[in-house]
Image (cartoon, helix red, strand yellow):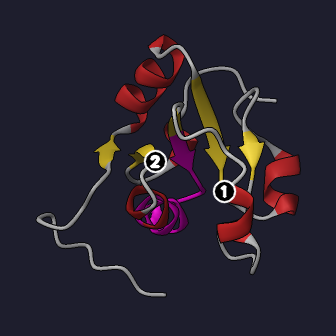
């Protein structure tokens, strides 16, 4: 599924790494959602993040189990897969924030 990057149709907010980190930390009832592969997730991740691989055929099914009342902070390695995941989730009514660019600029704790 290809999603347009047209700003007029975008229904999620892109944040730079610093703003993404601050908003995730300061938002109560939020979820860090890592949409990379399981292997990437196991190597390093934001603490307490959950992993749902956006490229997995069951992605749509798995996000249905998420709580729509929570803010979802979505990230991947470089921003492409997280943008795709945010597009899908926003269309389904989720509140989503995408780290634009590279999550490697994350300065907080990792596990």
Q: Determine whether label 2 and label 1 are within 8 Å by CB.
A: yes
**Residue numbers of the magenta segment:** 73-87
Question: Is 74 located above or below residue 26 in the figure?
Answer: below
Q: x and y percent of residue 107 in the render?
A: 55, 25
Question: Is 16 located above or below residue 59 in the figure?
Answer: above
Which mark is drawn over residue 63? 1
Q: Residues within 10 Å of mark 2 (few under 14, many from 20)?
A: many
Q: Residue furthest bottom?
A: 1
**Residue drawn at (64%, 44%) of the image:** 33
Q: x and y percent of residue 76 in the render?
A: 59, 55
The one nearer the camera, 25 or 29, is 29
Q: Which residue is mark 2?
A: 94
The one nearer the camera, 45 or 62, is 62
Q: How many marks?
A: 2
Question: Is 90 located above or below residue 96 in the figure?
Answer: below
Whether the magenta-drawn stretch holds residue 28 is answered as no
Q: Residue furthest left?
A: 8
Q: Is residue 11 left or right of residue 46?
A: left
| Quadrant containing the C terminus in the rendered view | top right
């Amino acid at each position: 599924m290809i999603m347009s990057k047209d700003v007029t149709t975008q229904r999620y907010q892109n944040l730079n790494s610093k703003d993404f980190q601050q908003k995730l930390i300061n938002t109560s009832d939020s979820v860090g959602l890592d949409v990379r592969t399981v292997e990437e997730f196991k190597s390093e991740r934001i603490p307490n993040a959950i992993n749902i691989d956006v490229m997995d055929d069951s992605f749509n099914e798995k996000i249905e189990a998420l709580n729509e009342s929570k803010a979802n902070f979505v990230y991947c390695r470089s921003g492409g897969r997280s943008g795709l995941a945010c597009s899908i989730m926003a269309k389904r009514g989720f509140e989503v924030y995408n780290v634009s660019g590279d999550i490697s600029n994350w300065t907080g704790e990792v596990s």
